[in-house]
Image (spheres, rainbow, N blue to C red):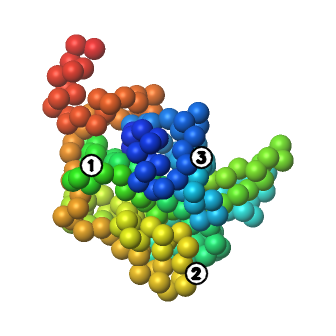
Amino acid sequence: MCGRFQLSVKGKTISERFNVEVFNEKYKPSYNCAPGQFLPVITNVQPKELQHFFWGFLPEWTNPDSKFKPLINSRAETVADKPTFKKAFQLRRCLVPANGFYEWKTDAAKQPYRIFLKSEKLFAMAGIWSSSTQADGTIRHSFSILTTAANKLMQDLHHRMPLILKPDEEQIWLFEQDTSKLKMLLKPPSDEELEKVPVSSRINAVKNNDASLILPQEVQRDLFSDV
């Protein structure tokens, strides 16, 4: 799955990497992007501007009184067919920029890890988005990150991972109309591209949001041993 990620670069870096306009009064770098926050996305309908949507997908048919729980992830294997996601998969896709994501080892210790490209470059996770009407009549734009089966690097942490697109797949994801071609993108990234590093459990608290979060666990232990 993907329950936290990192987008901590300057707006200029995002602008140059994805060829989008970034409004610095809206965009704020974050080391601890979490569900329920308004976070940056690049959509197929406004691909030249970095927008901010609510992380927690609500289908367009949900009404203001709905008890539908926002969905932070959608499974790549069923996104094209499941009624909740099918229309968004066909018509409303997005890129979710990141320069790292976090996963917790599924054992008693629940050790958090940061996973990132070995190059430390920005990447895009595949997403879908929707617009729904709230009780006060305003429109809420929301998104979900697609997940796929874990590659070998991730398997000892979790059986799922975010679907990371290659740079040459990003425009295909946004604009391709042939769903059979889109489905060809729904696969885990290669093990060789990624690296994982254990980090401090400080990442567990959303209030913690600083550069020290991405330091290796032993370095953070020294930094905060007297705090």
Left or right? Give the position of 134 relative to 148. Answer: right
Q: Residue at x 41, y 54 (%)?
A: 17
**Extreme right residue here?**
137
Mark 3 vs 2: CB contact within 8 A: no
Mark 2 vs 1: CB contact within 8 A: no
Above/below status of 141 relative to 28: below
Q: Nearer the viewer, residue 32 or 49?
A: 49
Looking at the rendered structure, the kind of residue marked 2 is: Gln
Q: Secondary structure at mark 1?
A: loop
Above/below status of 146 relative to 100: below
Residue 55 visible from this viewpoint: no
* Residue named by callout 3: 52
Q: Nearer the viewer, residue 13 or 63?
A: 13
Left or right? Give the position of 39 relative to 124. Answer: right
Above/below status of 3 relative to 172: above
Residue 218 figure quarter = top left
Q: Secondary structure at mark 3?
A: strand
Looking at the rendered structure, the kind of residue marked 3 is: His
Q: Mark 1 Cα within 10 Å, few/some/many (few <14, many 20+)?
A: few
